[in-house]
Image: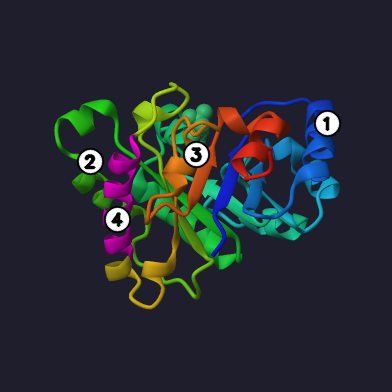
Amino acid sequence: MKKLLVANWKMNKTQKEVADFFLEFKKSFSEKRDAWIAPQTLHLEMALSLTKSHVKIGAQNCSEFLNGAYTGEISPASLKDLGGHFVILGHSERRQYFSETSKGLNAKVRSAISQNLKVIYCVGETLTEREAGQTLSLIEDQLHQGLNDMSIANTENLIIAYEPVWAIGTGKTATPAQAQEVHAHIRQVLHHKFPAFGKMLRILYGGSVKTDNVEELLGQKDIDGGLVGGASLKAKDFLALCGDK
Ligand code: PEP
């Protein structure tokens, strides 16, 4: 399977900046690696109209409810209807600022998968948790709670992003060995949870991925790609991460 680079643009970019990004990106993107992009919800339709099928577009969050009286929420059914391909769930910023918990996220994950959206489910430890030696058990809990009581129909339904909270937007990156250790553990847990497909699910690393560390990280056995914030905002940088200099 090709390595996958997912751009998380968070709450950034004007419409003009979105248009300029795609103009530049499309000129050089060679599909050596898979590239998915999650713009702000307000820019989803525009991004979909500016890309062809070779770049997949998705959202940074969605509701557990399919539709109804839930003011301000993002319907996974409408996201699918619009042409969205995937949704990122459980990003540490959502856990930190919007009180999302793994238990609560379980309903969102199941709802998105029911709509045939691919789910990128994020897990990761804080620095305090790492220093207390809790990384592996904490991540196991996040996986068990967030992915409780569900099945997957193929290797494409679900992607895990391991994002150590202390490495997101800080310029600090987990060493390739630190990341590989956690990824190998995640793979084991997935294998037990989903015996048919678990071993083949993609596991992305996220946390200050940049052009100067991407190759070493992606060279690790269990790292199938990256979830990228800051370095995905400029087309030139994201192209480089996708292997297109
Ligand atoms: C992220 O927000 O998922 C992320 C990994 O951000 P950054 O690449 O900026 O650390």
The quarter of the rendered structure image containing the C terminus is top right
As measured in the structure, the alpha-carbon distance from the residue carrying label 4 to the one carrying label 1 is 38 Å
Q: Say whether disc 3 or disc 2 marks the residue closer to the N-terminus.
A: 2
- Tell me which corner region of the image, top left, top right, bottom left or bottom right, holds residue 130: top left
The mark lying in front, picked from 3 and 2, is 3
Identify whether 203 is placed above or below 157: above
Q: Say whether disc 4 or disc 3 marks the residue closer to the N-terminus.
A: 4
- Helix, strand or loop at label 3? It is helix
As measured in the structure, the alpha-carbon distance from the residue carrying label 3 to the one carrying label 2 is 22 Å
**Amino acid type of disc 4?**
Ala
Q: Which mark is residue 184?
A: 4
Q: Which mark is residue 135?
A: 2
Q: Residue at label 1? A: 20
Q: Which mark is residue 52?
A: none
Could you tell me residue 138's position as x and y percent?
A: 23, 44
Q: Residue at label 3? A: 214
- Please tell me which residue is depicted at 33% across the width and 64% down the height of the picture: 190
The mark lying in front, picked from 4 and 3, is 3
Alpha-carbon neighbours of circle 3 within 10 Å: few (<14), some, or many (≥20)? some
Q: In the rendered view, does 30 fall on the left or right side of 27?
A: left
Q: Which residues are magenta?
A: 175-190
- Please tell me which residue is depicted at 42% across the width and 35% down the height of the picture: 92
Could you tell me residue 244's position as x and y percent?
A: 68, 43
As measured in the structure, the alpha-carbon distance from the residue carrying label 3 to the one carrying label 1 is 24 Å
